[in-house]
Amino acid sequence: MLKMGLSPESRENVQVMLNSDLIVVGGGMTGTCAAITAARKGIKVILVQDRPVLGGNGSSEVRLWVLGATSHMGNNNRWAREGGVIDEILVENLYRNKEGNAIIFDTILLEKVIEEKNITLLLNTVVVDLQKKDAHHIDSLKAYCSQNATEYILKAPLFCDASGDGVVGFRAGASFRMGAESKSEFKEGFTPTEEYGELLGHTIYFYSKNAGKPVKYVAPSFALTDINKIPRFRNIKTGDTGCNFWWFEYGGRLNTIYDTEKIKWELWGVVYGVWNYIKNSGNFPDSENLTLEWVGVIPGKRESRRFEGLYMLKQQDIVEQTPFYDAVSFGGWAIDLHPADGVFSELPGCNQYHSKGVYQIPYRCFLSRDIENLFIGGRLMSASHVAFGSTRVMATAAHGGQAIGMAAALCSEYGCNPKDFVAEGKIEILQEALNIAGQGIPGVPMKNASNLAASARIDVSSELVLNTIPFDGPWLNLDFSAGQLLPLKKDTAYSIDVMCEADQSTVMVVELRASSKAFNFTPDVTIEKIFVPLEKGVNQKTISFKNCLTENQYGFFIFNRNPNVKIRCSEKLLTGIVSVFNKTNPAVNNHGKQMPPENSGFESFEFWCPQRRPKGQNIAMTISPAIELFGKQNLVNGLIRPYLQPNAWVSGWSDQTPTITLTWDEPRKIETILLYLDPDYDHPMESTQMGHPEDVVPFCVRNYRIMDGEGNQVFEKTGNYQAIQHIQLPQPVVTDKLEIVIEPQSSVALPSIFEIGIY
């Protein structure tokens, strides 16, 4: 029994002092990925999260799907899903939770964190103060947990602010901004007008469910009563739920930090008022059995403080795809700005335009320019308001968080400060470590200097020679233009055979196109156009192109819209091969062609995007000369996704025991083996609400075993579904040979491996 009498002085809470190598404040996707990345490199991390779950806007408290450069497959960014830890999380979520349950996603994030022995997780803990060593260095943080009434003093040499509002950077005195820069500062064409507003607002979602019987609804007194105050109310449909209501936005005219509670009440009024309209207006008779299952209790924030780094990303960097020597991450979401009046605005709910491909993000954007031991991540990273319209999305932010976590670990290892890695010679160390961990920085391959696989003789049981995409699939009606994306060689004249069925005599227009930037997937250069006459019925046609590509890059064989024609497709799936379609996706401002306003700083171009499985089959064809870019040389070229070419070894069609053999001139000591498999980087893998067609990506190798030179099995994996196989051998193996034997597991996809790392 504890019994305490009156104390003449105020009592103090329990105080706990914790020390670590890195303190990460903010347990959203950015902070979570930063903490996991750093912990896996062996440093001690304290992850401080002011909520009861991880994930931030991606958690069950807000329920926004995690998304990034893939943009719902609505842009021209092929194979652009962010790699590393964020990819591991999304692939894990696909396996366990392909239906998109936000509660399950919570558990996946929590599990990933608590399984890292180097992470101390403090949930429900808010940073309330800090101490500085001097003007440019943070010494410690003071935090409080409301659930255990405990105060924490947290000390570390390095800090990462991924809190969204910048609670650490603000208290530390770091330079920051709120609102939009003037057009004169960065000459950005998309700078918003005063009428449009300078800040993005907050959003609260709701979910409904069918109760199986009539359910009445009586709205609370604070619910919005006049639905006409929401100009877009006619867009509301009974079946919409969750992220469908991203446009329930408010707060851009207020202070999006200090006015958050006021904004929340306004949004609650909108949500309950809309539900009242759905249930009681009489306009939705099919809502009779629906009940309100869940309403967010905290708003999802889009924008508040942005901190100034050593470099500030701007619109031109995104649109022009500026190359950076210190690139550590990438983005690809459209520059997506919203009117400050949000749900009450007469303007469209968003105003977004795309670039022609992904863009690099430099390391300097993640460093506070004046607090020497502070990383800035997520919504805080150094970007203009306009550029922030793209960098703010969660998968992009998480990818940057991984760069922060790796940089912090390397600072600890090398005894350096964060800014030391800006220097040429040091930044390459960070880039290499990130790419080995699966970051996939565009245009920055692994150097493989320490990779034993790069010094081995590599033999394979077979290699794909792509002369045919089999004619074994359905017929595709050309109600819209379709294209087959293939890796082609420069100065090579190609010929293709296709099978078409015409309702009547007609002409099919076929084009060969390429991208003006070889690394992009926007077909903005027409190489040649051919008019192919078709007779009524089935036609087998040979289409020979005289003109050639001038670069080694992906090309597009495009079949223009003709509703009188069907073209044969294939059931086969191949790593680095995809079909694309000139359709629309209004949710991401894709109307087939981007037509931006004059002087907005964006380009006009067509959208050619895949369709989600089970749709989107490859177009069946024979190809001459055959494409021979799936060979063993790709296993050590330093790239782990398609970029200019497939960058993957793919087995031959008839190989029943695909095998890769690595042989050295003398025995090598092997402790770690890395296999980089294909998780279909083209699939967005939205974390919540949107369901997915399968729980395991069909391209991914499921079962394999590894043998040494004596035929001893050193490792076996069954039922795999993850992209990166990090195999830490229980005991080092000394051998002059390794053999990787794969069990083909799919009737539609051939086994493939992007890269092998042996250390």
Image (tube, rainbow, N blue to C red):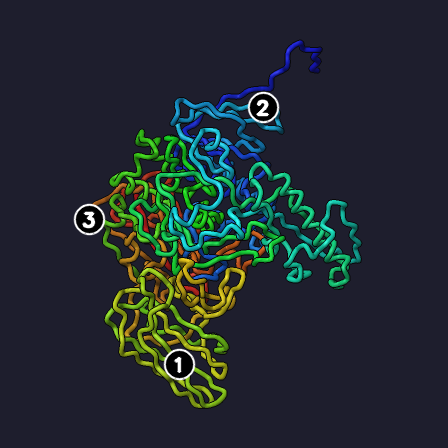
Residue 151: image location, x then y, percent: 56, 23
Q: Examine the rendering and report whether any part of residue 33 can be seen.
A: no
**Residue carrying label 2:** 150
Circle 2 SS class: strand
Q: Nearer the viewer, mark 3 or mark 1?
A: 1
Quadrant of the rendering where the C terminus is positioned: top left
- What is the CA distance from the residue labelled 3 to the residue labelled 2? 60 Å
Report the amino acid beneath label 1.
Answer: Val
**Residue carrying label 1:** 509
Report the amino acid beneath label 2.
Answer: Thr
Instruction: Tell whether 641 sits left or right of 348.
Output: left
Near mark 2 (Cα within 10 A), the count class, few <14, some 14-19 or many ≥20, is: some
Give 458 or 359, whichever is nearer the viewer: 359
The quadrant where residue 728 appears: top left
Residue 670: image location, x then y, percent: 30, 42
- Whichever of callouts 3 and 2 sits on the residue coming sooner in the sequence is 2
Q: Nearer the viewer, mark 3 or mark 2?
A: 2
Report the amino acid beneath label 3.
Answer: Asp
Question: Are circles 1 and 2 on residues that touch, CB within 8 Å?
Answer: no
Give 209 or 161, whichever is nearer the viewer: 161
**Residue carrying label 3:** 665
Give 324 or 707, whichever is nearer the viewer: 324
Near mark 3 (Cα within 10 A), the count class, few <14, some 14-19 or many ≥20, is: few
Circle 1 SS class: strand
The residue positioned 27% from the left and 65% from the top of the image is 552
Residue 391: image location, x then y, percent: 44, 48
